[in-house]
Image (tube, helix red, strand yellow):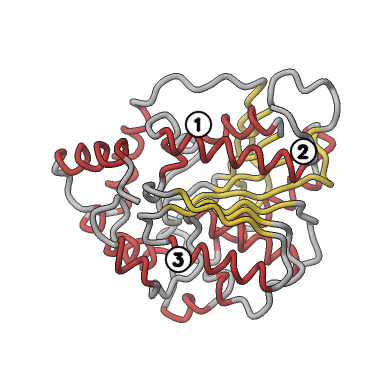
Amino acid sequence: MPLDAQVKVYLEQMAALGAPPLHTLTPQAVREATRQWVGMMGEPAPVGRVENRAIPGPAGEIPVRVYWPAGDGGGLLPMLVFFHGGGWVLCDLDTHDAICRALTNSAGCVTISVDYRLAPEHKFPAAPEDCYAATAWAAAHADELGGDAARLAVVGDSAGGNLAAVVALMARERGGPALAFQMLIYPATDLRMNTPSIAENGAGYGLDQAEMIWFGNHYMRDDADKLNPLASPLLAPELGGLPPALVVTAEYDPLRDEGERYGERLRAAGVPVTINRYDGMIHGFASMLDIFDGGRRAVDDCAAALRAAFGTGGK
């Protein structure tokens, strides 16, 4: 279908700013611009409680932000471990605060947002190792958090969707923790970057192919990393035994095809999976839930999927 009207206006506004292409800048310059953008965001949606912590990681402490919903009724809550996007190079706890709050409220869960190590300072496999460690910590500390380790899910968007898929693989291979669900929001699953949607949507839709190459070059140590299933989960030889999944894709996203291919491979391996493509949308739309109606709809749909996976129902 045509590009969504709200998305079209957004892209036109971004083009009118005349900012230099991301791939011509240093990671430090883009991070600073991102911090300024976050500083202009409105007041965050209230949740029951928020707490910043530092937890043990494989190379030092990992900052996390824990969210609790209001009015939980005193029982153990399902748990969600969230990995932010940003091409493994950008973003942090603040950039994805809004979506974490929305999921916490709508799904009625404890959410642990993970500030994993970023590239190029910390190249692959630093990010997946941090994310796995944070997920194992969440399971081990469920009682302390008021959470139910038997209802533990992982979720991420873009590079975070990649990390959520990878953590599910790592948990299977390493004997735990047990995961009830994986939610992959427009995930990167194949760092070879050779799908048709990259050619179709690789310029003019908010995430350009040149930027994807920039992210990949900062993240990977060498070309061999592209073939590692912990970087490209689509290349994992076997996907059986993984938790049920929701895969979210966008029509005008260069990552559309690799996300859908991963979902199809999960299904072929006997994993229960739903693949939701949002027509007219672009990469990153779910994080812009206050800008795009489609983003809000996707977050609501994701929360409903979590409630179903957690067996909680209701709002």
Who's the residue at 30% across and 59% down the image?
211
How far separated are the C-alphas under marks 1 and 3? Answer: 27 Å
Q: Give the vertical position of 115 relative to 25 (above or below).
A: above
| Residue 62 appearing in the image | yes
Which residue in the protein does label 2 denote? 78
Who's the residue at 63% across and 37% down the image?
303
| Residue 117 appearing in the image | no
Quadrant of res 78: top right
Tell me where residue 229 appears, x and y as whole percent.
58, 74
Q: Which mark is residue 98?
A: 1
Q: Give the vertical position of 225 relative to 45 (above or below).
A: below
Q: Name the element at disc 3.
A: helix
Q: Are marks 1 and 2 in contact (CB under 8 Å)?
A: no
Who's the residue at 59% across and 40% down the image?
301
Number of numbered discs visible in the structure rendering: 3
Tell me where residue 195 appears, x and y as whole percent.
40, 72
Whether residue 117 sits left or right of residue 77 in the image: it is left
Mark 3 vs 2, N-terminal side: 2
Q: Amino acid at mark 3?
A: Asp
Which residue in the protein does label 3 denote? 257
Q: Amino acid at mark 2?
A: Pro
Tell me where residue 22 appears, x and y as whole percent.
25, 53
Q: Amino acid at mark 1?
A: Ala
